[in-house]
Image (spheres, rainbow, N blue to C red):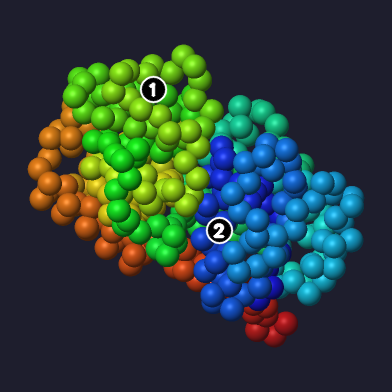
């Protein structure tokens, strides 16, 4: 297939979770023989933090103005088999209108932020990447979140077909590597600052750090405020680029996953960081949400933490038990949660959407 994508970003991983996912997915799609063209508006904050110059296995089209790139977009869509518009694409409405004018390509919307989308709708707030008809004009909708979110996308936004396309990891990019001293920690956490994660992060990370003053804790990410409740044994690595993720995770005895509040409440929302860390052979500690057990078996492949005592108990595990959990999680990820697996799921769903509807007998 030729697949044209209008997305938020693939060129910069700063402050967003889209770029790393798209990199693995595009690389896997290319290896499976598909051609990718990725359109990204060249905004200053991503240009200043760009850590990728090309689309892996495809073509990256950076543009300053939608009207200026419109002729190129039309040319690329003319022979496309599928056209994907994503959540938080800055030109999502214009791109969607263009896609709907080109019936040859399967029109796809990929919501990588489904709980945020649905929460904003419930609050009566504007969702800038959705038009007045919601998702009704797309042939297919992918959702980063499964479970009841799929029903809500159909009932509230008119999606004709809504299927989950969860996070994933590229094992070539994320694998065990040698420890790096600046990333060494008893417990690490990697994620952009988010106010709706703070209470959980305080309970599962900051609180335990204060009760284990002799243990080194490490946070990696961007946009952390000056009033974050640091302690002397909590260290900080600002914006850990994707190429550094294997070293970050491999240098930790344990790493923590904290889910954004809207996503945790909806469930079925595995973070890409879970899969990355597991692929790097690091034992996982995670907050608890509905559906977690469908991705990792609690106690066997992931340590579930509901409060600080659970984190402290994880820190007290001996190396044999910790390594057993890490090895089981890595095995599960390589079997079920790779970018290649998601790419195959994506193209299979697109093929189903492309197939002509069977006619009724006698029609």
Image location (x, y in percent) of residue 299: 18, 47
Q: Nearer the viewer, mark 1 or mark 2?
A: 2
| Residue 210 to residue 148: above or below | above
- In the picture of the structure, the residue carrying the numbered disc 1 is 199
| Residue 130 to residue 295: above or below | above
Q: Mark 2 Cα within 10 Å, few/some/many (few <14, many 20+)?
A: many
Which callout, 1 or 2, points at the residue further toward the start of the chain?
A: 2
Q: Is residue 108 left or right of residue 192?
A: right
Q: Residue at x 29, y 30 (%)?
A: 217
Image location (x, y in percent) of residue 265: 42, 35
Asked whether residue 272 appears in the rendered view, the answer is yes
Q: Residue at x 65, y 60 (%)?
A: 54
Q: Quadrant of residue 290?
A: top left
Q: Spatial distance from mark 1 to mark 2, Cα to Cα?
A: 31 Å
Element type where label 2 sits in the image: helix
Q: Which mark is residue 63?
A: none
Element type where label 1 sits in the image: helix
Q: How many marks?
A: 2
- In the picture of the structure, the residue carrying the numbered disc 2 is 23
| Residue 99 to residue 94: above or below | below
Q: Nearer the viewer, residue 202 or 174?
A: 174
Q: Quadrant of residue 138?
A: bottom right
Image location (x, y in percent) of residue 124: 66, 28
Q: Is residue 102 left or right of residue 207?
A: right
Q: Residue at x 44, y 60 (%)?
A: 173
Image location (x, y in percent) of residue 176: 31, 57
């Amino acid at each position: 297939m030729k697949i044209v994508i209008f997305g938020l970003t693939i060129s910069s991983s700063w402050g967003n979770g889209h770029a790393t996912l798209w990199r693995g997915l595009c690389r896997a799609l290319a290896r499976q023989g598909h051609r990718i063209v990725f359109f990204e508006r060249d905004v200053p904050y991503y240009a200043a933090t760009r850590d990728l110059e090309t689309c892996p296995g495809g073509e990256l089209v950076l543009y300053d103005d939608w009207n200026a790139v419109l002729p190129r977009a039309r040319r690329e869509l003319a022979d496309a088999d599928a056209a994907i518009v994503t959540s938080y694409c800055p030109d999502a409405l214009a791109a969607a209108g263009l896609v709907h004018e080109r019936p040859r390509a399967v029109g796809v919307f990929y919501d990588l932020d489904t709980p945020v989308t649905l929460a904003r709708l419930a609050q009566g707030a504007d969702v800038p990447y959705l038009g007045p008809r919601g998702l009704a004009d797309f042939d297919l909708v992918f959702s980063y979140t499964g479970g009841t979110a799929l029903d809500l996308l159909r009932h509230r936004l008119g999606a004709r077909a809504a299927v989950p396309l969860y996070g994933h990891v590229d094992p070539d990019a994320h694998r065990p590597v040698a420890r790096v001293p600046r990333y060494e920690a008893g417990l690490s956490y990697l994620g952009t600052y988010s106010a709706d994660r703070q209470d959980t992060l305080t309970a599962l990370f900051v609180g335990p750090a204060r009760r284990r003053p002799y243990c080194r804790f490490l946070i990696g990410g961007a946009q952390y405020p000056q009033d974050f409740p640091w302690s002397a044994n909590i260290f900080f690595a600002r914006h850990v680029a994707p190429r550094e993720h294997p070293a970050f995770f491999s240098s930790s005895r344990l790493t923590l996953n904290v889910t954004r509040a809207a996503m945790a409440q909806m469930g079925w929302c595995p973070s890409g960081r879970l899969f990355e860390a597991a692929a790097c052979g690091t034992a996982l500690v995670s907050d608890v949400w509905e559906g977690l057990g469908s991705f990792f078996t609690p106690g066997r492949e992931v340590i579930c933490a509901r409060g600080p005592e659970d984190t402290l108990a994880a820190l007290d595990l001996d190396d044999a038990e910790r390594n057993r959990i890490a090895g089981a999680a890595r095995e599960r990820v390589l079997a079920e949660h790779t970018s290649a697996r998601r790419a195959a799921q994506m193209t299979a769903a697109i093929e189903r959407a492309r197939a002509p509807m069977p006619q009724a007998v006698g029609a």
